[in-house]
């Protein structure tokens, strides 16, 4: 599982008190979803557009003790918005941050 300092800090910092439904947008490996599941009893949907990342997130969730409360969904945010009617108490996202960096070798 890929773990970065910014993701770990964000997962520890996000206020989850009172949240019953959480949406993790662009879950990647599932790090935030897993960290939040440890800190509260909320049901968590974790969406990821990339096939390989969604597969890794699903694997990580299945191997955790919180697999009953986290659902990984392989889709884009735009498509998920169109098909889902679920209301969330908390939305989280840990987007990649790039400033004057080299272009990636692959589109993903």
Image (spheres, rainbow, N blue to C red):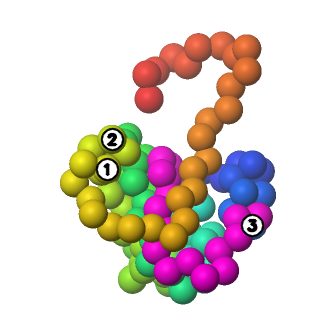
Residue for badge 2: 78
- 34 in magenta: no
Q: Position of residue 31 (x, y in %)?
A: 58, 60
Report how far apart the C-alphas of labels 3 and 2 lie in the structure: 27 Å
Report how far apart the C-alphas of labels 1 and 3 lie in the structure: 27 Å
Residue for badge 1: 81
Residue 58, quarter of picture:
bottom left
The residue drawn where x is 68% and y is 25% is: 98
Q: Position of residue 11 (x, y in %)?
A: 69, 63
Q: Main secondary structure of the magenta part?
A: loop
Q: Position of residue 53 (x, y in %)?
A: 43, 47
Residue for badge 3: 12
The residue drawn where x is 30% and y is 50% is: 80
Query: Please, what secondary structure does the residue beneath circle 1 have?
Result: helix
Tell me: 76 left or right of 5: left
Q: Earlier in the sequence, mark 1 or mark 3?
A: 3
Q: Earlier in the sequence, mark 3 or mark 2?
A: 3
* Part of the protein shown in magenta: 13-31
- Please say if the residues under marks 2 and 1 sit with CB atoms less than 8 Å apart: yes
Instruction: Decide: few, some or many residues near mark 3? Use Cα within 10 Å; few <14, some 14-19, many ≥20.
Output: some
Is residue 51 visible in the rendered image? The answer is: no
The numbered dot on residue 107 is none
Depth check, mark 1 against mark 3: the one in front is 1
- 21 in magenta: yes
Quarter in which the C terminus is drawn:
top left
Query: Please, what secondary structure does the residue beneath circle 3 have?
Result: helix
């Amino acid at each position: 599982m890929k773990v970065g300092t910014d993701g770990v800090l964000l997962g520890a910092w996000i206020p989850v008190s009172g949240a019953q439904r959480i949406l993790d947008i662009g879950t990647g490996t599932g790090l935030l979803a897993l960290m939040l599941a440890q800190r509260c009893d909320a049901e968590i949907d974790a969406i990821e557009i990339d096939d390989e990342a969604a597969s890794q997130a699903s694997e990580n969730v299945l191997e955790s003790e919180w697999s009953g409360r986290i659902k990984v969904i392989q889709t884009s945010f735009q498509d998920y918005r169109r098909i889902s009617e679920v209301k969330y108490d908390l939305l989280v996202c840990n987007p990649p941050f790039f400033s004057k960096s080299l272009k990636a070798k692959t589109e993903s």
